[in-house]
Image (tube, grey):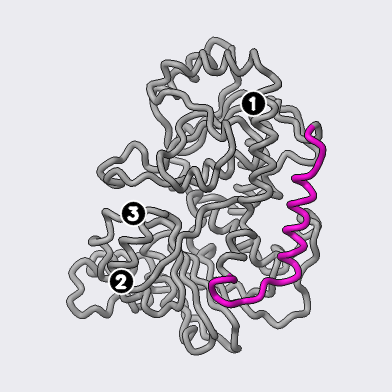
């Protein structure tokens, strides 16, 4: 896990300065000492942005030698927990005792099971004036499967979820109001502005994909018509060597790509979503990198709220039948192509950096934003106001 100092050293890149010589006012656990899977790196990036812009104690519990055994057993038994106590037991992580008082405790949880890891932080309820749980992935249809973890949410003053369609169902299930916190991106990392590089990659695709689209692009690549980069293994569940380096590599590839393939999250597992449509991280990342996103826009109100500008996604059929014609059409309209990429990058700078999400959390929690948050926001605005020709979309 990178130290606070290591994260703060990134301020030169972000046009701000570190919150040095301040007593930390925020306590935030992170799980990097025992899992660095690729699917977690987006939220680790969100944590890094907060550390870069405020005074934060980053708490990294370490796994004990029986951690995996205890965690697996605890997960299994939770489904039959008549005692209602297993949700509050530490799954084998080293205990952490807080030594000072904080204004805010932030529990960033990728999924339900992360709530168990918070049990390694002893007494945080007594040492923190207010508390927030950010539970990112919640699908309404799966709520009954996690009913034994509902009580773990009662400890928090404020609860945010990353899926808009789950806010109402979860609020009713736990008897407590929840709020939607959309995904985002480190827009300063992903933006092609101000020194855009040539886009030498034609199409970039990561994560879940429609087989029809992939096969069509693969055939075009085999014919030498395009340079196509795609996953060749189960990337999301793979451990990264360093989450920050993983995000840097991802951003550098995206910024050099013309087209970025997108699809609604879990679009190929309808038995999991039961028709619930959400916005995945790929949309925020592809937009921030100034790419032309091709694929399908999520058919949900949340997408229209987050991406209200034209051509945010250039639609192609999941079976891949029109991919070649859409790409050919875009090549014949270079001005339109460039305009789409510039608009995506600009809107992401103004709307979808993690700092905007943290300011929303702070507003709800009654925490005054730091001066460094304001500095980052000014930097984002300055980049968004660069002359259009400074952002190379082609």
The quarter holding residue 288 reads: top right
Q: Residues within 10 Å of mark 3 (few under 14, many from 20)?
A: many
Circle nearer the N terminus (2, 1): 2
Which tag is nearer the camera, tag 2 or tag 3? 2
Q: Which residue is mark 2?
A: 174
Residue visible at 43% across and 32% down in the picture: 209
The quarter holding residue 43 reads: bottom right
In the depicted structure, whether residue 385 falls above or below residue 329: below
Residue 245 is left or right of residue 327, and the answer is right
Residue visible at 36% across and 78% down in the picture: 154
Q: Which residues are magenta?
A: 362-388
Q: Residue furthest top?
A: 223
Residues under numbered marks 2 and 1 in contact, where contact means CB atoms less than 8 Å apart: no
Q: Quadrant of the N terminus?
A: bottom right
Circle nearer the N terminus (2, 3): 3
Q: Which residue is mark 3?
A: 139
Q: Which residue is mark 1?
A: 201
| Mark 2 vs mark 3, CA separation in Å | 14 Å
Percent position (x, y) of residue 329? Answer: 58, 14
Q: Which mark is drawn over residue 218? A: none
Q: Per the image, is 380 magenta?
A: yes
* Residue closest to the eye, 234 or 313: 313
Residues under numbered marks 2 and 3 in contact, where contact means CB atoms less than 8 Å apart: no
Percent position (x, y) of residue 239? Answer: 49, 50
Percent position (x, y) of residue 138? Answer: 37, 57
């Amino acid at each position: 896990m990178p130290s606070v100092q290591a994260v703060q050293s990134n301020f030169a890149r972000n046009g701000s300065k570190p919150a040095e010589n301040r007593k930390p006012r925020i306590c935030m656990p992170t799980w990097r000492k025992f899992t660095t899977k690729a699917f977690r790196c987006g939220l680790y990036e969100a944590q890094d942005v907060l550390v870069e812009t405020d005074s934060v104690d980053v708490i990294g519990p370490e796994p004990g030698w029986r951690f995996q055994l205890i965690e697996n057993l605890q997960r299994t038994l939770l489904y039959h927990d008549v005692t209602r106590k297993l949700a509050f037991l530490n799954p084998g992580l080293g205990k952490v005792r807080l030594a000072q008082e904080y204004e805010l405790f932030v529990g960033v949880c990728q999924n339900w099971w992360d709530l168990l890891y918070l049990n390694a932080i002893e007494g945080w309820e007594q040492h923190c004036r207010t508390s927030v749980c950010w539970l990112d992935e919640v699908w309404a249809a799966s709520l009954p499967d996690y009913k034994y973890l509902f009580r773990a949410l009662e400890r928090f003053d404020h609860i945010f979820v990353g899926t808009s369609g789950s806010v109402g169902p979860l609020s009713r299930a736990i008897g407590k109001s929840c709020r939607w916190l959309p995904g985002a991106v480190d827009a300063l990392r992903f933006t092609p502005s101000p020194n855009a590089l040539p886009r030498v990659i034609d199409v970039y695709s990561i994560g879940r994909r429609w087989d029809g689209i992939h096969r069509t692009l693969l055939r075009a690549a085999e014919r030498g018509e395009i340079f196509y980069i795609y996953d060749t293994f189960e990337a999301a569940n793979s451990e990264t060597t360093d989450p920050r380096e993983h995000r840097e590599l991802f951003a550098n590839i995206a910024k050099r790509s013309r087209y970025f393939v997108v699809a609604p999250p879990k679009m190929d597992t309808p038995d999991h979503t039961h028709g619930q449509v959400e916005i995945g991280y790929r949309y925020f990342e592809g937009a921030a990198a100034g790419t032309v996103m091709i694929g399908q826009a999520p058919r949900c109100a949340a997408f229209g709220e987050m991406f209200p500008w034209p051509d945010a996604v250039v639609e192609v059929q999941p079976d891949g039948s029109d991919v070649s014609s859409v790409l050919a059409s875009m090549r014949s309209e270079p001005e339109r192509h460039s305009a789409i990429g510039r608009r995506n990058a600009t809107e992401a700078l103004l709307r979808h950096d993690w700092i905007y999400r943290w300011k929303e959390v702070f507003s709800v929690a009654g925490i005054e934003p730091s001066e460094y948050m304001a500095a980052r926001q000014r930097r984002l605005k300055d980049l968004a106001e660069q002359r259009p020709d400074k952002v190379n979309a082609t």
